[in-house]
Image (tube, grey):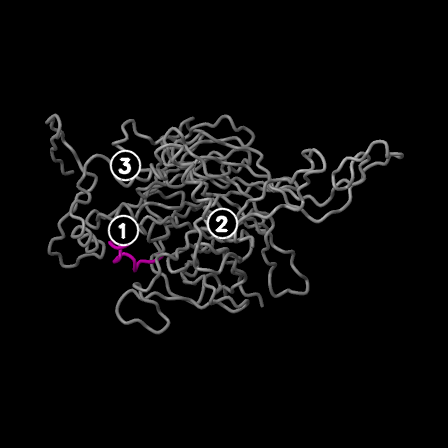
């Protein structure tokens, strides 16, 4: 496997590295497979692709999926903004017993119904 | 090795597929929460569950067969719907935990209630779905609406009795299996012992007992000591349908490992490794990406397993590790489009696959709302489309054909006209009948074979 040396920008230390994949030059072959032709296209558009060493970018990105927020406050603000946009106002639940007496667990509805029901159930 | 497939009128003694039902909104503006993320029939086929990106589960129940309507099987109607998972926030990593339901798996029915496991990226929940058709009436101290009676007005005593009421279907979470996965859960699979199940994330697989939520055993761990050395992740895992000690897991490098839990507590060493050798001269930048296995499913018999990678479906005989016994091309015409499919991320789409009840036909989805079926016996395959344009019941669906290049015949569609936003990632086949459920982005289609 092809190895090359890289030098740390900060301390000058040298290191050997093997990239996970190296583009192979599509030589003048009799037949260029469609995959190789596509690869050449990609290399033409993004010449730096696949040359960074140190682990696969795909896998790292995959392991860290999910939107990152600055902190929980940031997250809750974003959620609140989304909720204001999305939800239709839920009307008063007529079956809810209120006002006459202190409700007991048996009086309350089984489960808080989802404020936005799936359209598959519509 | 069977490679070629003859285009034919249908799969399997020429099943004639007809539209039966479609569920979901008609409008094109799809809310993200409505994106269907999983579809699964239960063991009898009477119930069909869907999960979506909004964390909701909708369960459909098949109507009892109408004796007068012998020309069609029962329709599926909404039976229960509930919010399975809510969005959460991981405070330690400042990352959102999506409520999207990644997988639903049904438990075999043991009593009047139905049980299913549903999972998002981090937490698995066991749900009990039960029916209530009676309620107690005639309390002494309470009115029927729940208000308390004035005790001084009570002059006689009566015994409350159960009276029929309108059917109510209730879903309640019975177990919550949390905090066992650092990475994102991609699979759950119930063991044939019906007591344990596995959950798999990108790097680890855990074994749970259905009754115990505060402990799980780690049975596979492929996390390298140095994360820089990471070369592959786990993409799917499943227990063998009959052998309670056997399970398989697939990887992003196109390999499948079969493990035997009797061999050791930590099954890091596989019992079998299934891998098709690759021609090194054909290797390209895309090779590893398109070889990544997005789904693995055992046949009902347990003799075979099927894997889905980006362009093909492969059938493996568990007794032969060095190559699949059958390979079916799903959309080979995409091989010359890999550059643009990489740019629009479609190359990372995870398609699922499924077997029919007798293991003679396999099905998987594609783009443009097309889905494909391959008959293993006749070697015929068919491409069909899930579209509202075809929704006349009992009209046989017309087969579709994609023209890869050159002159496009009438009724064919060219590769460049395919809509890559219309992907069918999730399909399910009724365990006994020729009834299939096909999920487009936000709609669920049910097709049945034409009964004469």
**Residue A37: image location, x then y, percent:** 19, 56
> Which residue occupies the foreground of this view, B176 or B188?
B176
Q: Is residue B299 visible?
A: no
> What label does residue B231 carry, if any?
3
Of badges 2 and 3, the one in the foreground is 2
Give the residues in magenta.
B330-341
| Circle nearer the N terminus (2, 3) | 2
Subunit under mark 1: B
Foreground pick, B29 / A71: A71
Crowd class of label 3 (few under 14; some 14 to 19; many from 20; radius 10 Å): some
- The reply to whether discs 2 and 3 touch (Cβ–Cβ < 8 Å) is no
What is the chief secondary structure element of the magenta stretch?
Answer: helix
| Image vertical order of residue B223 relative to residue B300, above or below | above
Numbered disc total: 3
For mark 3, name the chain.
B
- Residue corresponding to mark 1: B342
Mark 1 neighbour density, 10 Å: few (under 14) some (14–19) many (20 or more): some
| Of the image marks 3 and 1, the number of the one nearer the N terminus | 3
Tell me the quarter of the image containing the N terminus of chain B: bottom left
Q: Secondary structure at mark 1?
A: helix
């Amino acid at each position: 496997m092809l190895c090359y040396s890289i030098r740390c920008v900060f301390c000058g230390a040298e290191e050997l590295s093997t990239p996970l994949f190296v583009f192979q030059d599509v030589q003048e072959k009799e037949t260029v497979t469609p995959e190789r032709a596509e690869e050449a296209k990609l290399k033409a558009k993004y010449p730096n692709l696949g040359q960074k060493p140190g682990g696969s970018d795909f896998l790292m990105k995959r392991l860290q999926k999910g939107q990152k927020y600055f902190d929980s406050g940031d997250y809750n603000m974003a959620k609140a903004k989304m909720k204001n946009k999305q939800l239709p106002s839920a009307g008063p639940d007529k079956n809810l017993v209120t006002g006459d007496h202190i409700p007991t667990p048996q009086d309350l509805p089984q489960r808080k119904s989802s404020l936005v029901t799936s359209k598959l159930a519509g | 090795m069977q490679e070629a497939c003859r285009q034919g009128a249908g799969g399997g003694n020429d099943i004639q597929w007809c539209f039966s039902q479609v569920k979901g909104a008609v409008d094109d503006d799809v809310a993200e929460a409505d994106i269907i993320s999983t579809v699964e029939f239960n063991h009898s086929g009477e119930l069909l569950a869907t999960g979506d990106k909004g964390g909701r589960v909708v369960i459909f129940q098949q109507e009892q067969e109408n004796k007068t309507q012998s020309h069609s099987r029962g329709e599926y109607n909404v039976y229960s719907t509930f919010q399975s998972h809510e969005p959460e926030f991981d405070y330690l990593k400042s990352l959102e935990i999506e409520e999207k339901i990644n997988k639903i798996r049904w438990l075999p029915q043991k009593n009047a209630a139905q049980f299913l496991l549903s999972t998002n990226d981090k937490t698995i929940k066991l749900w009990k779905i039960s029916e209530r058709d009676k309620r107690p009436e005639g309390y002494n101290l309470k009115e029927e609406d729940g208000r308390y009676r004035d005790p001084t007005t009570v002059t006689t005593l009566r015994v409350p009795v159960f009276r029929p009421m309108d059917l109510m279907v209730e879903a309640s979470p019975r177990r919550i299996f949390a905090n066992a996965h650092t990475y994102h859960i991609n699979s759950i699979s119930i063991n044939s012992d019906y007591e344990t199940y596995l959950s798999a994330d990108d790097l680890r697989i855990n074994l749970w007992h259905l009754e115990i939520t505060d402990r799980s055993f780690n049975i596979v761990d492929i996390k390298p000591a140095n994360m820089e050395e990471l070369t592959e992740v786990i993409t799917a895992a499943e227990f063998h349908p009959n052998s309670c000690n056997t399970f398989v897991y697939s990887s992003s490098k196109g390999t499948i490992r079969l493990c035997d839990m009797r061999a050791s507590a930590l099954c890091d060493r596989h019992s079998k490794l299934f891998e098709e050798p690759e021609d090194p001269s054909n290797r390209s930048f895309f090779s590893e990406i398109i070889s990544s296995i997005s789904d693995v499913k055992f046949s009902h018999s347990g003799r075979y397993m099927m894997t889905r990678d980006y362009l093909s479906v492969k059938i493996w005989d568990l007794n032969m590790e060095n190559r699949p016994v059958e390979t079916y091309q799903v959309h080979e015409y995409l091989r010359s489009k890999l550059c643009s499919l990489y740019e629009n991320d479609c190359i990372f789409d995870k398609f699922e696959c499924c077997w029919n009840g007798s293991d003679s036909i396999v099905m998987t989805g594609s783009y443009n709302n097309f889905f494909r079926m391959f008959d293993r016996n006749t070697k015929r395959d068919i491409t069909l489309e899930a579209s509202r344009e075809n929704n006349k019941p009992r009209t046989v669906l017309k087969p579709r054909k994609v023209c890869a290049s050159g002159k496009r015949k009438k009724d064919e569609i060219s590769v460049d006209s395919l809509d890559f936003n219309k992907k069918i990632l999730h399909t399910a086949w009724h365990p006994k009948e020729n009834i299939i459920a096909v999920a487009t982005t936000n709609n669920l289609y049910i097709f049945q074979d034409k009964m004469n």
